[in-house]
Image (cartoon, rainbow, N blue to C red):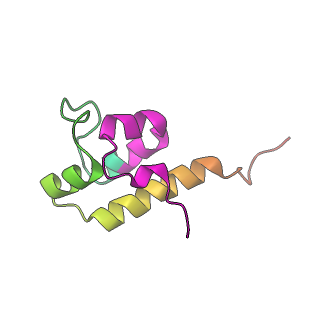
Amino acid sequence: MAMSHPIDNHDLPLDELMARWPETIGVFIDHRLLCIGCLIAPFHTVVDACREHGVDEDTLRADLHRAIEAQLRPSLNRTS
């Protein structure tokens, strides 16, 4: 059985998600979600944000995963 990424925890508050993975902030901006700095972010989850703003949860989660993976992948353009 494959282990899920901690970002898939349905109880993870948005402020903690963005603090642990700052590269996800751009995803929220791209989806026009005003979660960055929102007073509700400590209490809202991805599920809550998607429900409140009419964003497809699967799409948002996929974009969040891509942002994290891109940050973890070594850049092919780096020179030593």
Quarter of the C terminus within the rendering? top right
Residue occupying image coordinates x 24% and y 47%: 33
Quarter of the image holding residue 39? top left
Q: Nearer the viewer, residue 49 or 43?
A: 43
| Residue 40 percent coordinates (x, y) | 18, 34
Q: Compared to 53, does 41 lie above or below?
A: above
Left or right: 35 with respect to 80? left
Q: Position of residue 38 (x, y in %)?
A: 22, 32
The range drawn in magenta is: 1-27
Q: Furthest-bottom residue in view?
A: 1
Q: Would you say residue 18 sits in the magenta stretch?
A: yes
All told, the count of numbered labels is 0
Residue found 50% across the figure and 55% down from its top: 5
Query: In the rendered image of this protein, does residue 67 appear above or below residue 34?
Result: below
Residue farthest to the front, as pictured = 1
Residue 28 falls inside the magenta stretch:
no
Left-right relation of 67 to 72: left
Q: Position of residue 1 (x, y in %)?
A: 55, 70
- Where residue 18 sits, quadrant-wise, is top left
The residue lying at 34 percent from left, 52 percent from top is 30
The answer to which image quadrant residue 14 occupies is top left
Q: Is residue 79 left or right of residue 37?
A: right
Q: Residue at x 22, y 56 (%)?
A: 50
